[in-house]
Image: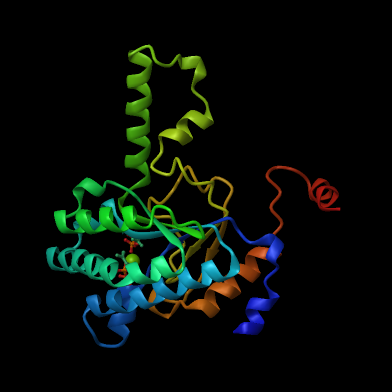
Amino acid sequence: MENLKIEIAKNNIPNHVAIIMDGNGRWAKLKGKPRIFGHKNGVTSVREIIEGCAEVGVNFLTLYAFSTENWNRPKLEVKTLMALLVSSLKKELKTLQKNNIKLNTIGNIENLPGKAQKELFEVVEKTKNNTTLTLTLALSYGSREEIVNVIKNISKNVVNNQLRIEEIDEKIINNHLYTFSLPDVDFMIRTSGEKRISNFLLWQIAYAELFFTDTLWPDFRKENLFKALLEYQKRERRFGKTSEQIEEINE
Ligand code: IPE
Ligand code: IPE
Ligand code: MG
């Protein structure tokens, strides 16, 4: 694995990696266990991936942990996921501090149980001066809901004469998103073989490189991350330009 890490070019690390952590339920089912067993084991992957990102110099990591649509799951699964969130936050605070990682959240956090909100608030507060990696947890997050809120808030500013319609541009929209403090996503990974975005960061992935793997989330470890990063480094990001133009810039 160290060999893999050495192969990763230090000058081409995605600044912002976003991950749709999918496949916990199927992983557990394959083992004849209840779905929650998969979620519990998924926490180990979370820890490894955070550490792996910090090691290679990713500055922003955003993890899709719970979507607005996930509220429709069986009550017991939702409850257990929330409890798992609280216990993981308690357990991982030390590791975040040790690795200089700052915790951030996006999503409708007010919808989470009080205990989870309190724990999140505490960890965010305690890690706010950390500088190595910004770890953003998407919780009760839905991209469409986020965009609806942006439109409402911008409209309010227009109605109150704080903003003219002509002034609305991409930057202003960006500044109203939950992700206002984060750069665009460079690399989006989804595990478990599904090839869909499931309402995650629709605006923010406009030019992200997408990576889909069949590996189920609890099996997605550092080695898998490093392989994915090597694949990212093979891509040519053209942003609408020609390949020749990109080569010229790189010369
Ligand atoms: C991802 O795994 C975790 C969450 C959505 C909370 P799933 O629970 O979706 O696992 P599968 O897709 O059913 O296997
Ligand atoms: C997406 O996974 C949400 C998270 C990973 C938190 P889902 O398993 O909920 O996605 P769909 O509904 O199958 O697309
Ligand atoms: Mg799933």
- Residue 21 seen in the figure: no
Q: Where does the image place residue 124, in percent across and percent down from the top left?
A: 33, 54
**Ligand 3 falls in which quarter?**
bottom left
Q: Is residue 27 above or below residue 160?
A: below
Q: Looking at the image, which residue sits at the far left?
A: 75
The quadrant of the image that shows the N terminus is: bottom right
Q: Is residue 214 above or below residue 109?
A: below
What residue sits 84% from the left and 49% below the top? 244
What residue sits 32% from the left and 27% below the top? 152
Q: Looking at the image, which residue sits at the far bottom?
A: 31
What residue sits 20% from the left and 63% below the top? 82
Location of residue 57 (image quadrant): bottom right
Pick whichever, 63 or 145, lies toward us: 63
Pick whichever, 146 or 110, lies toward us: 110
Pick whichever, 185 or 71, lies toward us: 185
Q: Looking at the image, which residue sits at the far top?
A: 161
